Amino acid sequence: MLVAIISIIIVAVVLFVLSYFMRDKFEELETQLEQLSITSMQDTFQMKKQIKILEEELMPADLTQDVHSNDEKNSVSN
């Protein structure tokens, strides 16, 4: 009985020590997921930035077209 308890304790200590030297797959997976998240956020930011720039470029064009179309309507009705 004493031999069984001692052997279980020895196996536990050996496994405990080995656990520090083994590669942690969950840590690697967590790092990859974090990188994917950061990349996704950067891409989203860039897309929103480009959309905002395009909207700002198109907005004045729409306003000038509306002004010209209103001027034409006024000149035709006079």
Image (cartoon, grey):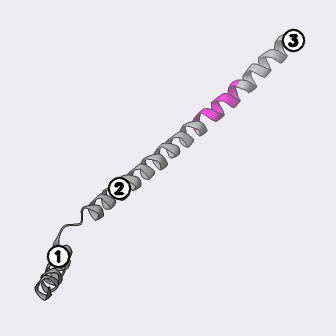
In the current view of this chain or complex, which residue is farthest to the bottom? 2
Quarter holding residue 52? top right
Q: Nearer the viewer, residue 2 or 14?
A: 2
Assign the N terminus to one quadrant of the image: bottom left
Give the CA distance from mark 3 to mark 1: 92 Å
> In the visual, does 18 lie left or right of 26?
left
Report if residue 50 lies within the magenta region.
Answer: no
SS at badge 2: helix
- Residue at 60% across, 33% down: 58
Assign the C terminus to one quadrant of the image: top right
Q: Main secondary structure of the magenta part?
A: helix
Give the CA distance from mark 3 to mark 2: 64 Å
Of marks 3 and 2, the one in the foreground: 2
Of marks 2 and 1, the one in the foreground: 1
Total labels: the figure holds 3
Q: Nearer the viewer, residue 30 or 17?
A: 17
Count neighbours of disc 1 (C-alpha within 10 A) and say few if under 14, some if 14 to 19, many if 20 or more. Answer: few
In magenta, the rendered stretch is 57-65
Q: Amino acid at mark 2?
A: Leu
Q: Which residue is mark 1?
A: 15
Task: Name above or below for residue 59 compared with residue 42.
Answer: above
Of marks 3 and 1, the one in the foreground: 1
Q: Amino acid at mark 3?
A: Ser
Q: Which residue is mark 2?
A: 33
SS at badge 3: helix
